[in-house]
Image (tube, helix red, strand yellow):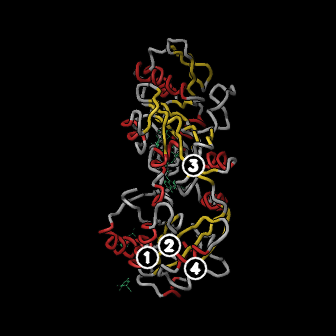
């Protein structure tokens, strides 16, 4: 922490009473007998300055002036009220820092660390942390702290035999972080993205007000904050819809060499949504431009003793498409066979796994552990998500998958799956 940074913060907060308690703590009193501490601990600042993208490698990271560890929504409201009334530098919320390009950071401002950190708090004093997930079994919802990781929300719900319905592929992301985007995965065709599965939010607004919002109450704020990239307020609590947790999952991958057959089958599967229809519970897919990928990223799946050879499948342009589906089940798997009969994949290319529901949801974490062991997790991730209109998807395949990527083989993951606009 440079002296210049600290000075900047103190100057900009000149109307607050500031005491420098130790080398890494700034103590504030907002004049109303409210005391709070900001951390300038180098490890807090370093953490807040980097994210999953790691796109600034080599260049000095942009540091915030300080980091705030809240234990409740009141703490956050107090900080933001002081910031609003007294001309503080910018404030941003950071969930698990798994977005890219410094989205959760604010250069020279204060980063609110929403996640539960084992280290405790700036002054080293252990206080009670933010509220734990609270489940209402009858009403079928869970109330979760904005900084809670989805994996912890899941674990808490499972103790009651319940689980949220709509997911992201990876669960080590915070509730507030994914609800500030959309939270999209293979369940979205049926349940909508995560932001369509929220009943109510507690939000701290830019003026430091604590506001409850929902479809019925403060509707404008509700819709602004969901998918609002942290720009309309800070989510401190989300009330999330849950369902009885499925027991087991049949997880199937099949390959296609013909892009239009692949997209036709995917679109057919997402047209089967709503209650009472025989449908898969999850529909995704990915593009394979390099055999390395099959035996790499998403694919502890394909047996190593029986590696898939793209060349043996007679592809056009050397690109393969993998449809990935799951069905949650308790006893019978008859419905799965019926659905598979409706598809037109390469007959010899069916890869099937059967596993507990939690293991399926937490699948990317297994990949994370493997990549970490090879030092391949904390590397730059120049990731990009795009919605492509159906009318241009064939051009996209020719130009990007078969063209740019087919000619410059990459072993990074390339996911592709359709979404219903109405969801
Ligand atoms: C391995 C991996 C897999 C992924 N898979 C998917 C996927 O399948 N589907 C999908 O939709 N996304 C996916 N993502 C993207 C991910 O959902 C977003 O990047 C998400 O923002 C990360 O959550 P986070 O808690 O790390 O948020 P952060 O990166 O900490 O924050 C992201 C944004 O949200 C804001 N924010 C954070 N917390 C709050 C809060 N409490 N209130 C208001 N604003 C807040 C921040 O200011 C920032 O603008 C994936 C990311 C990774 C790294
Ligand atoms: C892909 O399948 C479509 C019909 O689904 C067919 O018209 C087209 O010729 C096929 N393309 C190739 C390269 O075989
Ligand atoms: C980054 C890169 O190597 N791009 C090349 C990919 O392949 C096309 C040919 O299709 C080249 O024109 C690009 O330069």
Number of labels in the image equals: 4
Ligand 2 position by quadrant = bottom left
Residue 266 lies in what quarter of the image? bottom left
Q: Kindly check if marks 2 and 1 are in contact, taking CB atoms under 8 A apart as contact.
A: yes
Q: Which residue is mark 2?
A: 323
Does the image show residue 80? yes
Q: Indicate which disc, 3 or 2, sits on the residue closer to the N terminus.
A: 3
Q: Residue furthest left?
A: 391
- Residue 75's place in the image compared with 19, above or below, is below
Q: Which residue is mark 1?
A: 262
Residue 231 left/right relative to 372: left
Q: Which residue is mark 4?
A: 350
Q: CA distance from mark 3 to mark 1?
A: 32 Å
- Residue 244's place in the image compared with 5, above or below, is below
| Most foreground residue, 320 or 73 | 73
Report x, y in % for residue 24: 60, 27
Q: Which residue is pictured at 63% across the width and 44% down the height?
A: 137
Q: Which residue is mark 3?
A: 242
Q: Indicate which disc, 3 or 4, sits on the residue closer to the N terminus.
A: 3
Confirm if mark 1 falls within 8 A of ligand 2: no
Quarter occupied by the N terminus: top right
- Residue 263's place in the image compared with 166, above or below, is below
| Most foreground residue, 60 or 231 | 231
Confirm if mark 4 falls within 8 A of ligand 2: no
Does the image show residue 63? no
- Residue 340's place in the image compared with 390, above or below, is below
């Amino acid at each position: 922490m440079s002296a210049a940074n600290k000075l900047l913060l103190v100057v900009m907060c000149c109307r607050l009473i500031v005491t420098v308690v130790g080398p890494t703590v700034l103590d504030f009193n907002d004049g109303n007998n409210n005391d709070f501490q900001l951390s300038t601990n180098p490890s807090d600042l370093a953490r807040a300055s980097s994210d999953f993208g790691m796109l600034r490698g080599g260049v000095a990271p942009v540091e915030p002036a300080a980091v705030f560890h809240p234990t409740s929504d009141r703490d956050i409201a107090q900080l933001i009220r002081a910031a609003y009334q007294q001309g503080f530098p910018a404030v941003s919320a950071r969930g698990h820092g798994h977005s890219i390009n410094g989205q959760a950071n604010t250069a020279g401002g204060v980063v609110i660390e929403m996640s539960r950190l084992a280290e405790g708090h700036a002054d080293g004093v252990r206080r009670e942390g933010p509220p734990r997930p609270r489940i209402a079994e009858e009403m079928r919802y869970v109330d979760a702290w904005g900084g809670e990781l989805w994996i912890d929300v899941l674990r808490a719900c499972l103790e009651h035999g319940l689980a949220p319905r709509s997911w992201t592929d990876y669960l080590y992301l915070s509730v507030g972080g994914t609800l500030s985007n959309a939270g999209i995965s293979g369940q979205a065709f049926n349940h909508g993205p995560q932001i369509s599965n929220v009943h109510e939010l507690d939000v701290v607004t830019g003026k430091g007000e604590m506001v409850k919002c929902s479809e019925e109450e403060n509707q404008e704020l509700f819709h602004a904050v969901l998918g609002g990239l942290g720009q309309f307020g800070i989510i401190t609590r989300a009330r999330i819809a849950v369902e009885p947790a499925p027991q087991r999952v049949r997880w199937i991958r099949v390959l296609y060499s013909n892009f239009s057959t692949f997209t036709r089958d995917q679109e057919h599967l997402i047209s089967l949504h709503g209650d009472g229809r025989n449908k898969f519970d999850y529909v995704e897919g990915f593009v394979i431009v390099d055999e390395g990928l099959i035996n790499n990223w998403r694919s502890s799946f394909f047996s190593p003793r029986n590696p898939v050879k793209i060349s043996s499948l007679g592809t056009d342009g050397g690109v393969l498409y993998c449809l990935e589906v799951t069905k949650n089940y308790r006893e019978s798997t008859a419905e799965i066979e019926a659905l598979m009969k409706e598809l037109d994949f390469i007959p010899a290319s069916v890869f099937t796994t059967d596993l507990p529901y939690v293991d399926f949801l937490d699948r990317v974490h297994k990949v994370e552990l493997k990549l970490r062991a090879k030092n391949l997790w904390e590397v730059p991730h120049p990731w990009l998500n795009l919605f492509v209109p159906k009318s241009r998807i064939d051009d996209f395949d020719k130009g990007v998958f078969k063209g740019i990527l087919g000619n410059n083989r990459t072993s990074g993951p390339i996911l592709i799956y359709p979404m219903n606009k109405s969801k």
